[in-house]
Image: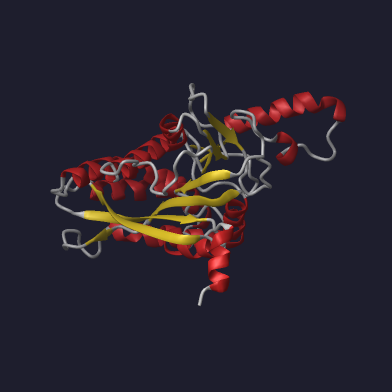
Amino acid sequence: MSEDIIAPDTDLHFIKDNHDPQDWQSETTSIASSIYKGLVENGRKYQTLREQGSHVPSDEQMFETYEASHLLAFIIDSDKGNALFQAPVEKPKHILDIGTGNGTWAIDVADLFPDATVRGVDLFPPPVTWLPPNCILEVDDILQQWTWRDPFDLVHLRLLDAAFTPEETDHLYQQCYDHLQPGGWIEQLEMSSFIECDDGSAPNNSILFDWGHRLTTAANKAGRPLGIMRTFQGSIEKAGFVDIQTKDYKWPIGPWPRDKILKEVGSVNYQHWLIGMEGYGMWLLTKYGDPVPWTKEGVQVYVAKMRKELSNPRIHVYHRARRIWARKPVDEDWVKVEFSP
């Protein structure tokens, strides 16, 4: 992996075998420029680093979505001493944030642990103009071989649903395991795309209940299953992690809860859905929509109906989220297992 700040590893991912060796500077410059420009499709900008494409855009509207999701995850755990992660990591030296998005989590953690080096990695350049001196944001494909020299004390992942095939998912968790310190921690936060209602305030035929099914069908056709929230505990365990701990949430959509914290979470999450739905759905539905790929206009009309329904103050809906943290074993763990009576 590249160790340059916000720089793609062009040698690994872009230079073709038939390029002119005398023209490598102009080719590399052109490649870097294309990464920042991205690919515009259906009015949204997407990354160009991974050939298989990305199901979410990398544009300003999506960065606002990431900011809202970061804020609501922070608020809902604001009663904790550390609302950024739950793993019992003390005095970390090296932290990795996979799928860093706009880099907010990595920046906040770098501020919290000024003696640690915090790296955030994603497929597109984050919209930042200033970083703490101990925070490095990189553009790279996390599925490629990792070449960072220092093992990590914590690897953090968030909102990676439908980002990978099952085989890529297994490979990613193995990479995390192999590059953690013995006793180091992995932590991941994921949310469900299925909207739920417990009190009957939303009718059974509400379009809101259609959203999760639509996206799940499209993601399955794309070969990138949606629903990582139900499967990532098993994937983490399969990779060899121990001491797996889980925390489940209900994230309200809208300021309808009576609880002060949940009301604030609901307000932020409402904005998260309004801003983010088009980005979450456009690529999947225009390429793998059921029964045939949708048009851009069809997606926009669908999203407009979703927004109208969510804006109804009389309905009380939410979606689920799950946080998991787990530890890489140390030698003593294997001894305990081998010699336990």
In front of the other: 239 or 295: 239
Q: In this view, does 164 lie to the left or right of 265?
A: right
- Outermost residue, top direction? 129
In front of the other: 236 or 341: 341
Q: In which quarter of the image is residue 174?
A: bottom right
Q: Position of residue 89 (x, y in %)?
A: 45, 45
Q: In this view, does 81 lie above or below 247?
A: above
Q: Where is residue 302 in the image (x, y as percent from the top left)?
A: 35, 50
In front of the other: 54 or 239: 239
Q: Position of residue 107 (x, y in %)?
A: 45, 31
* Total numbered badges shown on the rendered structure: 0
**What residue is at 39 percent from the left and 35 percent from the top?**
64
**What residue is at 73 percent from the left and 40 percent from the top?**
12
In front of the other: 251 or 5: 5
- Here the colouring is secondary structure
Q: In this view, does 214 lie above or below 53?
A: below
- Outermost residue, bottom direction? 341
**What residue is at 46 percent from the left and 29 percent from the top?**
114
Q: In which quarter of the image is the N terminus?
A: top right
Q: Is residue 211 left or right of residue 317?
A: right
**Whether residue 290 can be seen here:** no
**Whether residue 245 can be seen here:** yes
